[in-house]
Amino acid sequence: MDQIDPVTKKPKGSPYMPAGAMPVVASSATVPLLTLGRVHAGALADEEEIAHRVEVPASVCAGHPRAFALEVEGDCMNRVIPEGSHALVDPDRQPANGSIAVVETEDYRAVMRRWYKGSTKLMLSADSFEDYEDMIFGMDDGPVRVIGTVVWFQAADEME
């Protein structure tokens, strides 16, 4: 108990951190992943194949062993993930409401949107500074195949 400051109720000698904050640990351990292609985060378009490597923290890869990287194209998710970023997609993680999911629509086009599923409808919603219509699918609409859930991303400017 003598290690706790009676006024701040925090450990003595530790730097100030807001409540709920977690300390950051510097690590250079990264795993190079091959980028499999581009996913559209804008108007629907065919995905493109690209081939370059993205450095991903080893701790992230360890938690998502079958994950793959996609380059984000378009601005429909730019409040969260800027265009040109690399998103790590876990094909084993089912999206929960509010998650960012990569899905393939009936016309075989991959798109990245926020996932909201109700009892009879699926809404894929943009999270952008621009205006985009929500994509809404009902039971009678064509299939929407989940490719995976975005679990991590790296902004393009920080990768140089």
Image (spheres, rainbow, N blue to C red):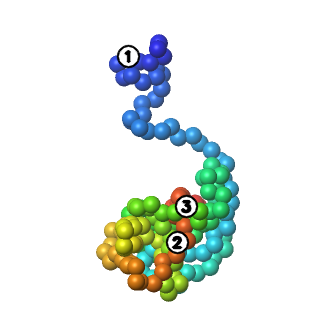
Quarter of image, res 86: bottom right
User: Which residue is disc 1 drawn over?
Assistant: 6
Q: Which mark is residue 146?
A: 2
Q: Earlier in the sequence, mark 1 or mark 2?
A: 1
Disc 1 to disc 2, C-alpha distance? 52 Å
Q: Nearer the viewer, residue 82 or 139?
A: 139
Residue 112 percent coordinates (x, y): 47, 71
Helix, strand or loop under label 1? loop
Residue situated in front as seen by the camera: 109 or 73: 109
Residue 95 showing in the rendered view = yes
Q: Tell me the distance, in whole angstroms, between the alpha carbons under discs 2 and 3.
A: 10 Å
Judge the density around disc 1: few (<14), some (14-19), many (≥20) Cα neighbours within 10 Å.
few
Q: Residues within 10 Å of mark 2 (few under 14, many from 20)?
A: some
Asked whether disc 2 touches disc 3, contact meaning CB atoms under 8 Å apart, the reply is no
Estimate the x, y position of residue 87 in percent, counting from the top left: 54, 64
Looking at the image, is mark 2 or mark 3 earlier in the sequence? Answer: 3
Residue 126 at x, y = what percent? 38, 70
